[in-house]
Image: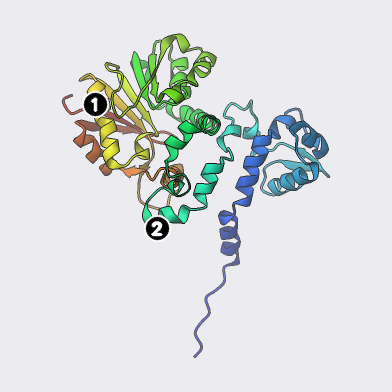
């Protein structure tokens, strides 16, 4: 008797083809970089006008917008005339949760993804295959790419703020240090909502050099101290709270303990450390944290950890997890010193 041939699930074949595609993501990024959505704020426009306004090649832009319209990103309201859709709206610069800068076409990142199989085989950063100096050293030496990376992080920060602000009693704090806080968008966003809070932004000198206009725009510059330095060496002492937002998971266990130990040395007995980052859980549920986990693997070789794994690192550093506060994105892990009752 001839073996039974497996049933062909054609819908799954097409779905997998869609999920494996990188043409649409690259097209979204290119159109976002051109600022096409900004040209459609007042309504649909012909592609020739869009091309002229954005410096694009009209026939090529037409092909790109038609491909995206097939995915619900933009709509062709009449031949060669395009308008916004709900999926295209966040690509506007003036959108409250604008994602225009969230998707930069960073050449070093793209080169790293081309070697992602190396990361899966070895657990090492694919980025290091093409740029052996490592991600952060590369960014420090390339200010243009570093600025675009910071802009992408600021776009992500808007979503994180929307998730974190209602989830935690920030108003209980008088002083907070954002350790590895980038250009200050997250810390500044919290301070803008809570005028009684004074902050310290702490990161590498070339990173915090970009913070002043961000803090000024948020109206918190007079309440925020900006300090440059290495968080592996020393952290500004004596604050009510310390923040590590998507920092810890970028480092291996030894470096993570070094960082936590430096923060522990700066904390008062009653200070708290707030860690915002993905926490690994088993199962098939979609979690944006799992995507961040792979991003970290590709770029720096780090990754998300389980709650138990995090607690082991905290224990070595003289800290303990007091509670985990869920948000719409990542949990807020509230951590205290072991000496606190």
Q: Which of 77/39 is in front? A: 39
Quarter of the image where the C terminus is located? top left
- Quarter of the image where one finds residue 101: top right
Q: Is residue 256 left or right of residue 135?
A: left
Residue occupying the point 54% across, 15% down: 217
Give the Cα distance between marks 2 and 1. Answer: 35 Å
Q: What secondary structure is marked by label 1?
A: helix
* First in sequence: mark 2 vs mark 1: 2
- Location of residue 231 in the rendering, given as x and y in whole percent from the top left corner: 32, 27
- Location of residue 252 in the rendering, given as x and y in whole percent from the top left corner: 31, 42
Q: What secondary structure is marked by label 2?
A: helix
How are the colours assigned in the image? rainbow
Residue occupying the point 67% across, 45% down: 72
Residue occupying the point 56% across, 59% down: 16
- Location of residue 130 in the rendering, given as x and y in whole percent from the top left corner: 48, 48
Q: Which of 150/312 is in front? A: 150
Q: Is residue 148 left or right of residue 322?
A: right
- Quarter of the image where one finds residue 309: top left
Instruction: Give above or below for 271 relative to 324.
Output: above
Looking at the image, which residue sits at the far bottom? Answer: 1
* Residue bearing mark 1: 264
> How many numbered marks are there?
2
* Residue bearing mark 2: 121
Instruction: Give above or below for 6 relative to 20.
Output: below
Looking at the image, which residue sits at the far top? Answer: 222
Q: Nearer the viewer, mark 2 or mark 1?
A: 2
Label number found at residue 86? none
Q: Is residue 139 left or right of residue 247?
A: right
Q: Which of 186/135 is in front? A: 135
10 Å crowding of disc 2: few (<14), some (14-19), many (20+)? few
Residue occupying the point 77% across, 39% down: 82
- Location of residue 329 in the rendering, given as x and y in whole percent from the top left corner: 44, 36
């Amino acid at each position: 008797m001839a073996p039974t041939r497996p049933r062909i699930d054609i819908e799954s074949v097409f779905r997998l083809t869609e999920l494996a595609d990188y043409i649409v993501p690259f097209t979204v990024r290119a159109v976002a970089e051109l600022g096409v959505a900004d040209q459609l704020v007042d309504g649909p426009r012909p592609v020739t006008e869009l091309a002229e306004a954005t410096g694009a090649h009209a026939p090529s832009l037409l092909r790109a917008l038609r491909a995206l319209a097939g995915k619900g990103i933009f709509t062709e309201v009449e031949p060669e005339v395009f308008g916004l859709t709900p999926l295209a709206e966040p690509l506007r610069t003036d959108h409250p949760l604008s994602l225009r800068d969230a998707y930069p076409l960073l050449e070093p990142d793209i080169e790293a993804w081309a070697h992602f199989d190396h990361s899966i085989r070895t657990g090492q950063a694919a980025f290091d295959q093409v740029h052996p100096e490592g991600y952060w050293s590369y960014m420090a030496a390339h200010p243009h790419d570093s600025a675009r990376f910071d802009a992408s992080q600021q776009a992500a920060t808007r979503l994180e703020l929307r998730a974190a602000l209602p989830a935690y009693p920030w108003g209980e704090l008088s002083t907070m240090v954002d350790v590895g806080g980038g250009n200050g968008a997250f810390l500044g966003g919290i301070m803008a909502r809570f005028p009684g809070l004074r902050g310290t932004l702490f990161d590498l000198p070339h990173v915090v050099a970009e913070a002043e206009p961000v803090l000024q725009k948020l109206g918190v510059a007079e309440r925020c101290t900006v300090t440059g330095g290495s968080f592996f060496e020393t952290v500004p002492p004596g604050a009510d709270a310390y923040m590590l937002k998507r920092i810890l998971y970028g480092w291996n266990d030894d470096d993570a303990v070094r960082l936590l130990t430096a923060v522990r040395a700066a904390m008062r007995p009653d200070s708290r450390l707030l860690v915002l980052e993905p926490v690994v859980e088993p199962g098939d549920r979609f979690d944006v944290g799992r995507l961040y986990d792979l991003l970290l693997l590709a770029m720096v070789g780090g990754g998300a950890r389980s709650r138990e794994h995090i607690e082991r690192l905290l224990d070595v550093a003289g800290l303990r997890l007091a509670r985990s506060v869920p948000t719409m994105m990542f949990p807020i892990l509230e951590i205290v010193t072991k000496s606190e009752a």
